Amino acid sequence: YCSISGYGRTGPMADMPGYDLIIQAYSGLMNLTGEPDGRPLRVGFSLVDLFAGMMAYGSIMTALLHKRNTGRGQRIDTSLLDGQVAAMSYHATGYIGTGVEPHRLGSGHPSLVPYQSFPASDGQFILGCANNGLWERLCRAIERPDLLDDPRFTDNTDRVEHRAECIDTLSEIFSTKPVAAWVELITGAGIPCGPINRVSDVVNDKQVKARNMFVDIPHPNVPDLRVPASPLKLEDSPPTVRRHPPLLGQHNEEILSESGHTPEQIERLREAGVIGR
C-alpha cells in the first residue's frame, strides 16, 4: 500500500491537509523562486505534486523488487513535504554547513556564473557556463577574449564574488543582437544555451516533434485531442496510448459491480442522483 499525504503519516502535522502551493511555500521553494527584490513566487506548474508522484512510483518499484526477493510486502509512506525537502538538498546542505541563508537569484545559480537568462535585443535567452572551460569558449565566441584577463572573472569563484559586474558586462554585450543570433553563435561554440520558449513554441518545436512527445487520441467528444506523450523511451516495450480518457461515469457499473453492488443497488444510486446515467 502506498500513501501520499501533505506532510506524512507521522509528526505534529500528520493530519493537516496540503496542496502543491502550500508545500511550495512551507518547504522553502517559493522563498528561493523569483527576483532578489521581488516577492516569493510559485513555480509555474505543480512541481510538488508531480515530484511526489515520481517518488511514489520509484518507491513502489523498489517495494515490488523487495517483495520478489523476500516475499514480503510493505507500506509506503511519502508526502509532498518530504519530496521537496529532499529536492532542496543543495540549498539545505549549504545552509547547514555555512549558516548562510540562501536567497532568491532570479534565474541565476548560487554557485555558477554566468548561469542564467540574459536580455538580447528582441527577447531573452538562457546561458549555462558551468565551468571555466565553457567561460573561455564564451569569451572567445563573443569576441571578448579580454574578459579572460580580467581578475574579477578569471575563475568561477571570482565570477560568483563579482556576480553583478559579470552579469552587467555580458548583458550589455548581449543587448546588441537578437536571441536567434546569440543562440546560434553560442551553441555553435559548444556552450549550453537556448531560447526561453513559450508553451506554443514547445508544442511546435522540431526537437519535441522528433521525440514524438505529443500523441493524438481518438475521442468521441473531443475532435483532434492531442496530449503530451510518455517521456519514457523503452527500446523493447515502448509505452502506447490504448484508449482515450474515460468519459464521466463511463465505468460506473463495472467499478460498482466489482465492489459488490447489485444491479438493483446501482440503479437506486442512479435514481438518487449519486451517479450519472
Image (cartoon, rainbow, N blue to C red):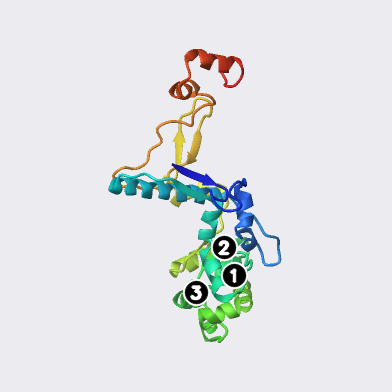
Q: Nearer the viewer, residue 94 or 213?
A: 94
Q: Amino acid at mark 3?
A: Leu
- Residue at image position (61%, 17%) is 272
The residue tagged 2 is 125
The residue tagged 1 is 174
Q: Amino acid at mark 2?
A: Phe
- Residue at image position (46%, 31%) is 244
Q: Earlier in the sequence, mark 1 or mark 2?
A: 2
Give the CA separation, mark 1 to mark 2.
Answer: 10 Å
Compared to 72, does 158 lie above or below?
below
Q: Earlier in the sequence, mark 2 or mark 3?
A: 2
Give the CA separation, mark 3 to mark 1.
Answer: 12 Å
Badge number at residue 138: 3
- Residue at image position (56%, 85%) is 150
Horizontal and vertical percent for residue 247? 52, 26
Quadrant including the N terminus: top left
Compared to 246, does 95 lie above or below?
below
Q: Residues within 10 Å of mark 1 (few under 14, many from 20)?
A: many
Q: Are marks 2 and 3 in contact (CB under 8 Å)?
A: no
- Residue at image position (43%, 23%) is 258
Question: On the rendered structure, is 98 left or right of 245?
Answer: right
